[in-house]
Amino acid sequence: MTPFANLLDRLIYTPARNTKLALIVDYFRHAPDPDRGWALAALTGGLSFPGVKAGAIRDLAMRRVDPVLFQWSYDYVGDLAETTALIWPERRTNRAWPTLGEVVHGLQTTARADAPDVIEEWLDPLDATGRWALLKLITGGLRVGVSARLAKVALAEYGKVDATEIEEVWHGLTPPYGELFAWLDGAAPRPDLEDKPVFRPPMLAHPLEDAEVAGLDFDAFLAEWKWDGIRVQVVSRAGQKRLYSRTGDDIGAGFPDVLDAVSFEGVLDGELLVGIDGDVRPFNELQQRLNRKSVTAAMLRKHPAFVRLYDILFDGREDLRALPTMQRRARLEAFVERHAPQRMDLSEVVDFSSSDELERMRAGARGTSTEGLMLKRRDAPYVAGRPKGLWYKWKRGPLTVDAVLMYAQRGHGKRSSFYSDYTFGAWRENPETGAAELVPVGKAYFGFTDDELKLLDKWVRDHTVNRFGPVREVEHALVFEVAFDSVNRSPRHKSGVAMRFPRIARIRWDKPAAEADRLETLEKLIE
Amino acid sequence: MASPHPETWVEVRPQGLYVVPGDFYVDPLRAVDRAVITHGHSDHARAGHRSVMATVETLAIMAHRLGAQPEQDKRALAYGEVMRVGETEVSLHPAGHVLGSAQVLVEYQGSRIAVSGDYKRRADPTCAAFVPVKCDVFVTEATFGLPVFRHPDDRAEIAKLLDSVRLFPERCHVVGVYSLGKAQRVIGLLREAGWHRPIFVHGALQPMCALYEAHGVPLGDLRPATAGAKGSPKDEFKGAIVLAPPSAIIDRWARRLPDPVVCMASGWMRVRQRARQGGVELPLIISDHADWDELLQTFDDVGAPEIWITHGREEALMHAASARGYRARALALVGYEDEGGS
């Protein structure tokens, strides 16, 4: 428990990715098996003890602590596990700190009713940090700012292998990951994945910059629409079906409608969209269904999901990734023809006779649930990662508005001394008074250079009119040209609109705030 | 004749705690005729009193912070020295909080009240240790008056800092400390832990460090943390420990430092969310106040049947003191804040 508790305690305060990586790798080096495997499971969200609820922890605290004092303390601290860890009155004991393996084994083999007694015995020998780590582990949700992806990158760094190799084996393994560590330590061969529905790291595209367009040999490329959904991988092997996000998260639980329709064996690459009979709905409808552990029948009816397929990695168990794009395309078409999968259709190939024609299509892509075009080299194999020169995303130009800076917030990590997160607004008439007022329409924290950030930080400090903790309200006197991909209606925002992917395109030091755009301008851009 | 209970001769007035038969206030919140001051933090030691009684160190700190105040009648009292004030006898006893900090013991017709100001029970290389004084009423603070506040061993906290310095030798460790007390204590603890390299201090901390040294508290090799400003090389600070006021550690001032690990030395660092909100990367739980267990232990040590609570989280402490059989009362004095940096 000691190394794990220390690791969590450092991670929770560490904003910098590289420092986090260094801490995790260092932990993998020094922690014993199976503890490090259980820790890995905890960090990647693969460990849960449904038998122990938060209420049980509270009851446990009540065995030792005055309930009035506990309640006041909880009100102050705001976190049950931390309150209990801090307030716990230790009794002297000869027991050593429990190991992570003992804790996991103990919880898995203890009846629910006996769990509190077992936990109580662990709490006494621990210190406040150890108790906090133990209770966080038991109640789930470590919230130490480590994504599953980061943990996998740390594994790759630890074992000196490519991160895509970790991704490939990941979903075929289970905690405490003995065979994974044995492989990374060089003590065993790579784990066998033959019958496992594992995730295959996807091929990613580079943005096509304006300057590159003239030099590109368009004839060597296949064009498709770039759909405005989320990239997914449909995997079916040995009767096991999975839906993975681009980063390898298993998102199948939120999309039973898609998974139920899978009746084949293979690995397909495509875009998850919401819509009926090929009629694609805007992205914010898909968003309603993301990040859910389960989904209601009403949601399934209202926002039905499907996958628009654009590549095939495995046909049955045959690995097609070494084939060139055009051959994989033919195999994909044949696959769809053969299986006629429900809840899936083919992403059409966009025919074009010249780059000019293609450029016109790209510009006209607005309003069709697409973000532009994809260009894929006809002779390219399917390569994991982001290889150069093979796939391009050619997004339509962004929309822009001029908005007025309203609030600035301190950044994080290296930016913690800078006011680097900006909320900006557009003008409207107050519905009651008719007076002109600004209403926030978005927030952006990039798009400017480091030198511009210094100037913005100074400007914010010099024009502050109000402070709310890390946030400063500023004079309505600085205009940003804000670029964004699209704008949707949003009842959650006061302005009624929400931008997608807003960023600062230019700082309009010259422009008077009164000449910034009005809310109606944004509303007209809603598709 | 039975001794009069302190509640018959000590009053809470808008100016602060007033001792009627001595005609003086302890740590008054506004200017008064006669004041006895426990310690130099600005919420306890205010300007404008006509006469002030305090330890010689506290008087020096007040002169530095508030100016000379030439019209003021100042009377320095050594620890344990008894002084007749009106019909009372007043003496000062170490409170262990910061240099010169004192509990004020007032005796009137055989009845004794001890006003502790702020205090701590841990050893501190930079000030005299708390001495429990027998009394009938003990007036306590309650800054950390919740049972979640149990300060760990401060040596382990310093070890945490030194471990991090070893782990990240290319980075600079900047530690947020309040200028009176915490800065010098952290320096003292670092020296005790064997850190004899120069320690760099922000300009706002230098005068108080000099004052401590002038009063016989050696702090070792201190250097101004001004190098590195305006484009000069930052290399000097690689692997160094820099102390600065909390307001500076994540603000513009800290940009001169090479990739700083932001640390903060405070009892509030016990609660993770609080530490994280402040942008702290390495919290050091080092406090100049008694923690929960020490507050309750102190009540037992001074043997007073009655506890009055001046400021902090008094409801929880009242609750716990009552449960232990003490008569406990909250004085509801407003105006004492946390300038001292806990």
Image: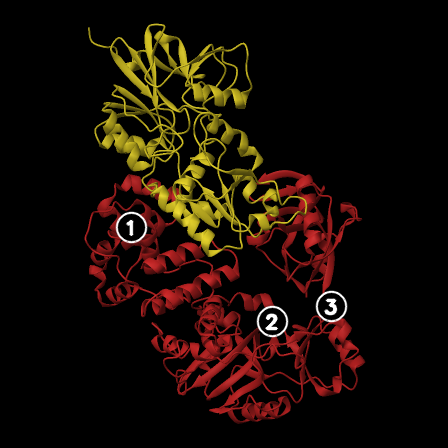
Chain colours: A red, B yellow
> Judging from the image, what secondary structure is the residue with disc 2 in?
loop
> Judging from the image, what secondary structure is the residue with disc 1 in?
helix
Marks 2/3 in contact by CB < 8 Å: the verdict is no
Residue marked by disc 3: A397
Whether residue A263 is visible to the viewer of this picture, yes or no, is yes
Give the quarter of the figure containing the N terminus of chain B: top left
Relative to A118, does residue A38 appear above or below in the rendering?
Answer: below
A247 vs A229, nearest the viewer: A247
Q: Are marks 3 and 1 on the same chain?
A: yes
Number of marks present in the image shown: 3
Q: Amino acid at mark 1?
A: Arg
> What label does residue A58 carry, if any?
1
Dot 3 or dot 1: first in sequence order is: 1
Q: Amino acid at mark 3?
A: Gly
Residue marked by disc 2: A281
Q: Residues within 10 Å of mark 1 (few under 14, many from 20)?
A: some
Q: Residues within 10 Å of mark 2 (few under 14, many from 20)?
A: some
Q: CA distance from mark 1 to mark 2?
A: 45 Å
Q: Residue at x 72, y 87 (%)?
A: A220
Mark closer to the observer (2, 3): 3
Q: Amino acid at mark 2?
A: Arg
Q: CA distance from mark 2 to mark 3?
A: 21 Å
Chain for disc number 2: A
